Image: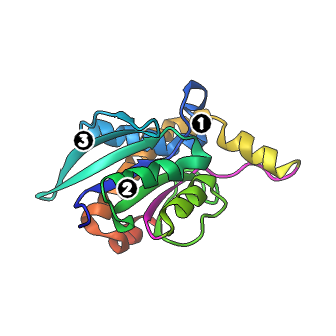
């Protein structure tokens, strides 16, 4: 029998040097959700920091796990699929929060299924779960200036920090990302897409 739990995974890279980088939008959003719902993280098999709690919104209680994979971005799938298998959580109860270079900074798009859009963390999760049919909260970080070596540019960009203007907007952006994850659980995917995708 499938679990009633939801799993929310915020993607990022572990370690000090990655802390405030664009690639760690998922971690930042997971940290805010942890604060909101008093989640205490503990190690899950060396693959992720994992905690569980109950969300109470609009008179409903929903149990959820919150994960921050420790596997580095390109192996995020190992962590997500291990937790999902261990707690019998189906893909339709999984939400992955990640940075997205195809969206301008501050934009959020919500989707389920579809292409990984070149995001290695998402490719890894698609592979490990054997399906892309889980919900994704895509947090826009914009993209590097084109030109020069595109690959190096991309890597330097996602592992770069935010400028002063973006830093000011970051708390609100992260709060929106956390809201979007909650909305998927409580309002459903379609309603959440209506709310965020057109902004």
Occupied quadrant, residue 24: top right
Which residue is identified by label 2? 84
Q: Residues within 10 Å of mark 3 (few under 14, many from 20)?
A: some
| Crowd band around label 2 with a 10 angstrom C-alpha radius: few (<14), some (14–19), many (20+) | many
Residue 66 falls inside the magenta stretch: no
Callout 3 secondary element: loop
Q: Which residue is mark 1?
A: 21
Q: Is residue 45 left or right of residue 139?
A: left
The segment highlighted magenta reads 133-147
Task: Identify the mark nearer the N-term, 1 or 2.
Answer: 1
Q: How many marks?
A: 3
**Residue found farthest to the top:** 16
Identify residue for label 3: 37
Res. 22 image quadrant = top right
Q: Do tag 1 and tag 2 residues touch (Cβ < 8 Å)?
A: no
Whole-percent x, y for residue 36 in the image: 27, 40
């Amino acid at each position: 029998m499938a679990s009633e739990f939801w799993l929310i995974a915020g993607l990022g890279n572990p370690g000090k040097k990655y802390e405030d980088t664009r690639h760690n939008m998922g971690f930042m959003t997971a940290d805010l959700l942890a604060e909101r719902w008093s989640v205490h993280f503990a190690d899950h098999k060396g693959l992720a920091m994992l905690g569980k709690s109950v969300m109470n919104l609009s008179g409903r209680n929903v149990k959820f796990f919150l994960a921050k994979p420790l596997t580095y971005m390109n192996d995020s799938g190992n962590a997500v699929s291990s937790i999902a298998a261990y707690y019998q959580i189906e893909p339709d109860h999984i939400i992955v929060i990640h940075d997205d270079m195809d969206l301008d900074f501050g934009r959020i798009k919500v989707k389920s299924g579809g292409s990984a859009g070149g995001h290695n963390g998402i490719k890894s999760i698609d592979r490990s779960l054997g399906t892309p049919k889980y919900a994704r909260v895509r947090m826009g970080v914009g993209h590097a200036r084109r030109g020069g070596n595109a690959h190096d540019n991309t890597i330097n960009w996602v592992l770069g920090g935010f400028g002063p203007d973006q830093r000011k907007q970051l708390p609100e952006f992260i709060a929106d990302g956390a809201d979007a994850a909650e909305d998927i659980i409580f309002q459903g995917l379609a309603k959440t897409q209506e709310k965020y995708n057109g902004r």
